[in-house]
Image: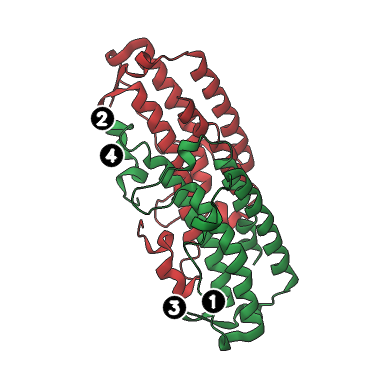
Chain colours: A red, B green
Amino acid sequence: MSEAIAILSRTPATLDALLRGLPDGWIAAHEGGETWSPFDVVGHLIHGERTDWVPRARIIMEQGEAKPFDKFDRLAQFEESQGRTLASLLDEFASLRRGSLRELEALHLTDADLDRRGRHPGLGVVTLRQLLSTWVAHDLDHVVQISRVLARQYSDEVGPWRAYLRIISGEQG
Amino acid sequence: MSEAIAILSRTPATLDALLRGLPDGWIAAHEGGETWSPFDVVGHLIHGERTDWVPRARIIMEQGEAKPFDKFDRLAQFEESQGRTLASLLDEFASLRRGSLRELEALHLTDADLDRRGRHPGLGVVTLRQLLSTWVAHDLDHVVQISRVLARQYSDEVGPWRAYLRIISGEQG
């Protein structure tokens, strides 16, 4: 748990350091089609704080497998973030995350609690431990996504170095 | 140029926010075999500040294609970081990066300068613009790498969510 919280508590500051004050061209950049920009991703993380992680932990603790989690809306940010600035989204994410971690702490989870089971609407039975581990990996997945989106704006500009840059060549390496 | 510097100037704080104070298990984590840990990556970035980016820019400005760049030692950090703490590496990287950006500014590069050419020992002719773009993408590539290494420590812990997490499933998505 303390290992997971070490990452979860750092994500807002990481995204703040990477994104706050960047020129708009970077903030709105995406990878084409319906892929997300850094701005979109921060809105998605906000929606996760409101409806996904701690709310689902609470469903597991209170109702177990009896009540499936509400479905998560992966596209909610396209409406919710409209007209907002990136700065205000970063502030809100940081504030919501602090609140989530306080709520998590207030649950005083034991090792036995982490083995409690809930029901995911698509994946079936999951444990609280899996939910919290996924929260950590999900944060990092979106740090990866934002960094990749930014880097790929230079796919052509790097010229022959393209071959060495896994972030652009698409190799995982 | 100002777009590139916007990213380059943020990387030390981004890594600081993500890594400083994390438990040792996270800092030393890697993806098996000879893959790098977050600790290794920060050492690699330090070596880049010392021997790669600005030194190569200077070779282009002073000697053009006549003098190939020195080869970059991708493994230097395994000796240079020995016995160091992550905190001291993060401090050194931040200080070196500030110095690199000051030196870059002092070159007063014009658009014409960015088209100047140098010779990479493996890739052949490259421009100063390509070098500086690669510097940006290289930073972001390593932010991706560190985040991926951290997330993959939970490859098993996330259970069925594995299917949804591109960072773990290996899909680029």
Tag 2 secondary structure: loop
Q: Earlier in the sequence, mark 4 or mark 3?
A: 3
Kind of residue indicated by mark 3: Gly
Tag 3 secondary structure: loop
Q: Position of residue A44 (x, y in %)?
A: 47, 38
Front label number (4 vs 3) = 3
Kind of residue indicated by mark 2: Leu
Res A77 visible? no
Tag 4 secondary structure: helix
Mark 2, other Cα within 10 Å: few <14 / some 14–19 / many ≥20: few
Which of the two residues, A77 or A1, is positioned nearer the viewer here? A1
Residue B122, numbered circle: 3
Residue plotted at (53% across, 23% down): A101
Q: Are marks 1 and 3 on the same chain?
A: yes
Q: Are marks 2 and 4 on the same chain?
A: no
Marks 1 and 3, how far apart at CA: 10 Å
Marks 1 and 2, how far apart at CA: 52 Å
Q: Position of residue B111 (x, y in %)?
A: 65, 77
Marks 2 and 3, how far apart at CA: 48 Å
Kind of residue indicated by mark 1: Asp
Mark 3 chain = B
| Circle 4 residue | B163
Question: Are dots 2 and 4 in contact, CB under 8 Å?
Answer: yes
Residue plotted at (41% across, 46% down): B148
Residue B70, numbered circle: 1
